[in-house]
Image (cartoon, grey):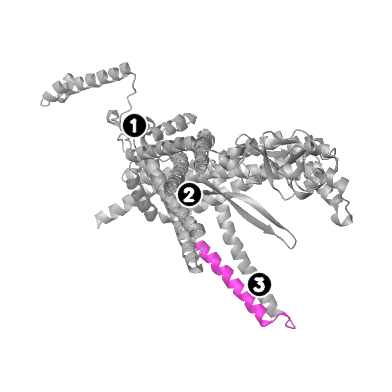
Amino acid sequence: QWEKEFNQQKMGSSKSKEKEPEAAADTDNKSDDKEKGKDDVSPENVDSAAEKKQFDGFLSGYKPDGKRRKCTDCLCLLMVVACWVGITYLGMKALETGNPQKLIGGLDYKGRICGYSRTVSTKFMWNIVAIDGAGVCLKNCPTESTWNTVGWFDPDDIDMLVCKDTTNSTAWWRDYPFFLILNGDCMFKFASTDYLGFCVLNDMSIFTDIFTQYFSFDDGYNLDAVFESTNYVTTICGDIWSSRYYILGFGFGGAVFMAYTYTYLMRIPIITKTVVWGSIWGIFFFALGLAGYAHYTVGVYKAEVPMVRTPSEINMMETLSIIFFGASMAWLCIILYLKDRLTLAIGLIIQTAKALVSMPLLVIIVPVIQVIAYILFTIPWVIYCIMMAASGDIVVKQAGITDDDNAIQVNYKSFQYTTQQKREAWFMLFGYFWTSEFIVAMGQIITAMCLCCFFFTRDKSKIGNSTVLWGIFLVIRYHMGTVAFGACIVAIVRLIRAYITYLEKYAGGGNTRLKKMILRCLQCFMACIERCIKYINFNAYIQTCIWGTSFCTSAYNAFWLIFRNIARIAAVTGVTHFLAFIGKLAVILGTAGSFYYTMDHYYAAMVSSLVVPTFLVALIASAVAIMFFEVFGMGTTVLLQCFIADEEMNKETPEDCFADGDLRKYLNKNGKSRKKKKTAAAAK
């Protein structure tokens, strides 16, 4: 500091004397930074043009304009944390007051809840006790079956049955198992296991044995067809189980390999340009060929002697000729108008492919982080909601099931909740919407940040999997508040949609058709609003990654950026979707085909049929392809906005741009044309 002040005081001295202390001061500052363990990466320390071209401030926490990145929308981050605290508080309160046995406990024939009602509080197991489906509460499930050992008219065998607490003790048939079962007071014991408080049979085939012994079937039941279909399902399950490791290996590993191979090929300019331009001109010549063929057919029809075709057929073919010719000319006009945009789109796709190949961890780690975060939130949230649902008051009701001969009364549970409990439930739903959208938005902004790091780094050799970790750090360190802001807006819209659905289904039984139609129209309108907000949010996250601005500023800039560059966005989106479709098709067919070939040639004895396993491999590969090319599509959108930012920053000096490859050529071409226009205007 004293050297800098000393230099400033000697401003009037000669330049040669000034340069020496300034150089010494710079040397001392650099040595101080080395002593502190810091790198000299500040844009203020970059002087020469050569050093500016090599400076990669984006990888050091700087924005493209050389300013330090700052935290954005911190209040929203505190709000989402407060929401999580509120969810935890309500959940802990529900854990104290709720009893899940009220939800899962079965109702016995008296309407008592097993394990909860006072008289059966120690009996948690529900077991069937009557032919009509009535149940009884037991302490333990039966461990053995007695249906084939009970004597129908032996009073000593009543203990081998499961019976109600009270039976008709005055009836003459009370001592005979046959009449107790027939009257619905008792039931055979069946060996069963406890599943969530219900006694479930260990061997479901016992019913087949019972029907075979006590009932006779004629050919009308077609039991052979039933057994044959059962064997077919068993065979399919066996094939899946036998080849499970190959299904998972090819479905996940093979699909990822195919996707990366396709992306690696897309980074080669000649391949991408050939595919895109070949497809575009192929469509033009195909439409033109159809027009020519239709016109030729018209001439053939008119030259027939005698005339075979009707005038309507000839007119229809002439109309088709005109339509195809007009479509080909319209397509040609679109190509000529969007030629530069299509060139830009191809360049962006090539750069996106290079970025994904340079950062293979990006496609894997972001979905994994999202899934883990979603699971960690959803599991306690579901537990809290279950306990809150178990905090309501139970009302046992009866419903009658009748036919021509019989009437059966069935008990069922209904819950009543206070107004406060309903409000807490709506808050829990809002917290779920907010958190789930927050997790999705975190994946989007991390992807955008990593791709921004790729674009605004001049030395691409610095890009790798470590860039993904750096992008995650930048988002967590500076922009989680912006993510919370955007997720909150979407969550509010989703909550409104949920409330409209609630009104449509539960608000009064006398809703007219007009009311339902209005509510459904509102539902569609809010769905459109939600889609628009999500689109604006993603573009706002990109602006935040580039410029470090808050959500509102980023959303405003993103909206007008889209408005100004609608033609570019349309061209990039169309080309990206086309290549993504080809990529998905290649990944699915390539993975399924390689699985079928491998299994058929090397492991044919393992399975009886490859149809279902191959279908499962294709299903898994389609999920992987959708996930992979979703990132690919986001990448082109991110790099487009980075390119526009680079173009606006370096309008006058395109040679200083960050763009690489075909994108740099595009900027240089536009820069030269812009200079020519200015020169011509100045000459006038």
Query: Alpha carbon of mark 2 to alpha carbon of mark 3: how far?
Result: 37 Å
Q: Quadrant of residue 157?
A: top right
| Mark 1, secondary structure of its residue | helix
**Residue range highlighted in magenta:** 304-332
Q: Quadrant of residue 135?
A: top right
Circle nearer the viewer, 2 or 1: 2
Query: Alpha carbon of mark 2 to alpha carbon of mark 1: how far?
Result: 30 Å
> Taking 537 as reference, is 48 left or right?
left
- Magenta region's main secondary structure? helix
Residue that carries the numbered disc 2 in the rendered image: 345
Residue 13 seen in the current view: no
> Taking 65 as reference, is 398 left or right?
right
Disc with the residue nearer the chain's start (3 vs 1):
1
Q: Nearer the viewer, residue 670 or 680?
A: 670
Residue 89 location in percent, x, y?
A: 42, 36
Q: Nearer the viewer, residue 658 or 140?
A: 140
Residue 4 higher or lower than 139, as above or below: above
Residue 27 higher or lower than 468, as above or below: above
Q: Nearer the viewer, residue 130 or 72?
A: 130
Residue 73 location in percent, x, y?
A: 33, 40
Q: Please give the label number shown on residue 50.
A: 1
Residue 278 seen in the current view: yes
Disc with the residue nearer the chain's start (2 vs 3):
3
> Taking 39 as reference, is 534 left or right?
right
* Disc 2 residue crowd, few under 14, some 14–19, many 20+, Cα 10 Å: many
Amino acid, disc 2: Ala
Residue that carries the numbered disc 3 in the rendered image: 296
Q: Please give the label number shown on residue 662.
A: none
Circle nearer the viewer, 2 or 3: 2
Residue 522 location in percent, x, y?
A: 45, 61
| Mark 2, secondary structure of its residue | helix
